[in-house]
Amino acid sequence: MQSFVLPYTAVLSARFRMILQYRAAAIAGFVTQIGWGAIRVMAMEAFYRSTSAPQPMHLEDVVTYIWLGQALLGLLPWNPDTEIRAMVRSGTVAYELVRPVNLYTYWFSRSMAFRIAPTFMRSIPLAILALLFFGMQAPASPEALVYWLAATFGAVLLSTALTVILSITLMWTISGEGVSFLVSPVIYFLAGMVIPLPLFPDWAQRVLDILPFRGICDAPFRLYMGHIPATEAWAVLFHQLIWIIILVAFGAWLLSRATRRLVVQGG
Amino acid sequence: MPVPQILVDNIVKTFRIAQRRPGLWGALHGVLRREYRTIKALDRVSFELDPGELVGYIGPNGAGKSTTVKVLSGILVPDSGRCEIDGRIPWRNRIANAANIGVVFGQRTQLWWDLPVIESFDLLRDIYRIESVEYDRARDELAALMDLEPLYDVPVRQLSLGQRMRCDLAAALLHAPSVLFLDEPTIGLDAVSKLAVRDFIKRLNRDRGVTVVLTTHDMDDIEALCDRVMVIGHGRILSDSTLDDLRTRVTRERRLIIDLLDGGQTIEDPDVTFISRSGNRVHLQFDPDRVRTAALISRITAKYAIKDLFVENPPIEEIISRLYDEHELR
């Protein structure tokens, strides 16, 4: 068992360590995300001041939701894995296929590090700042904290499965820029990073409940603040699990198609 | 009759490439209607390799060398044909085949760009699931052969091309593969690095019996390393023989190089043709079927004042270039 998972954990930890070297990127991202978070909070405050109708979420919850989103922004699957992109462009991807490993699992491990490592670096200082100064609340209860952690783990897997699919499309498109252009606004919007999902109208809720994107930010955040009660946590985790299975199966199928029609760039 | 280690039988591989007309109008046209061109990268390629062979695989750019290597490594799936390495079909048993072969694509590195060399090696140990005792032994041996230890802590992006190639070769061999595919391993290297790489490949083949398929444009690589040479062009094997046989088949000509005592002289003889002259040195050409070498030499030395004289085969570049010409590969 240990020897079976070894290649995958090894590549994950190597990638993780590599990304941790990029401190300048982390600091830049940190500053941007604080600025952007402040703007979003101000917009929401203005919105709440201008309405007297009861909203499905208290303003304090919305503020916490926004700061959690800013801290965990890196988890959003909005672009292909940059390392795989570079390999496809240069043709180095050929080496990926001469490794005695399952390519899908291998890329999943790489992409998981690609999603976690930058987030890991930025989220902790950002969350501390937001908790101390910007009105972010602590978890609703110890129970809520535990379920939030579990759902965040689910969100990582979900996000990674989507990232791998985006990376596999590179085998057709090579550049991946078009994919990022198309996908990133959709993901931002549907995950709740523009407007918190509970503020969407009822008819939209029914669609959002089915789509996988709710499981990446919205549902874990609301578990954290107790907006989804702990008794319903299993439903969130189950929804994530179903989508993880579907997306992993689809990704693995897509990759097997991609490798069969592969044209390695360059001689 | 030993079983061949590598069997390639009538492999065909075509690529469909989207054509684009030049300019803006062409780009717009391409959006509306794609036109495809089919390229036959491999057109019924067949050969067999026995364990421990070191084969040179040469041909002009785009002839199908790399495609062959990619089919053998399980990266590309051919349209038709049979191919086995140690009884495994590369693209069907990709993972088992990958554990048994080593591959180096000279123009690309398999090392992690941002990591120190040693960390790349350690990562490969984990990816290939090499036992740590065996890994340490293999790594130390390779390091000793190519003087890698001073490079261990250098990030790959800071290595010179020659250093990188030595590390890449080691990286392809840590898991002790029985077959090694080298796709232009000497490309862009300086003379010293080339010699080091050649020497290493030779030892690897001789001392450990690793089967090596070497693609290259550098004919010195072939001269120095390979007994057997396969020439490919337009996706077909044009020639598969020893270097000497290839030579005699393409041209029987020999070179006669003469250093004259008196630079003013011109050598005239019915059996030789003049090629070039630089200072006191004259390059001539003759056909050993028409005139015996010994007879020619004694005739010329009797007639002219000569300081030194030697007979050579035409350089391998010329042989190959003639072969390409014969098959209209230009």
Image (cartoon, rainbow, N blue to C red):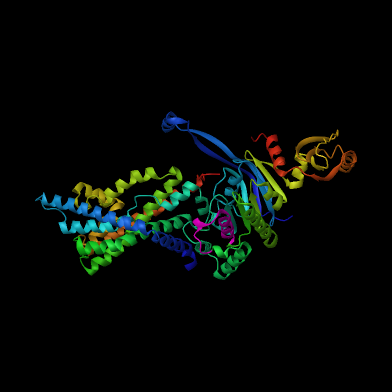
- Residue B296 shown left or right of residue B145 in the figure: right
Is residue B155 part of the magenta span, yes or no? yes
Is any atom of residue B272 visible in this view? yes
- Across and down, in percent, residue A128 comes to 25, 64
- Across and down, in percent, residue B81 comes to 61, 44
- Residue A255 shown left or right of residue A219 in the figure: right
Who is closer to the viewer here, A122 or A168?
A: A122
- Magenta residues (range): B152-173
Instruction: Locate the C terminus of chain A and report the quarter of the image it occupies.
Output: top right
- Across and down, in percent, residue B269 comes to 86, 34
Q: Which quarter of the picture shows residue A110?
A: bottom left
Is any atom of residue A157 visible in this view? no
Q: Residue furthest left?
A: A52
Dominant SS in magenta: helix
Q: Which quarter of the picture shows residue B64?
A: top right
- Across and down, in percent, residue B227 comes to 73, 51
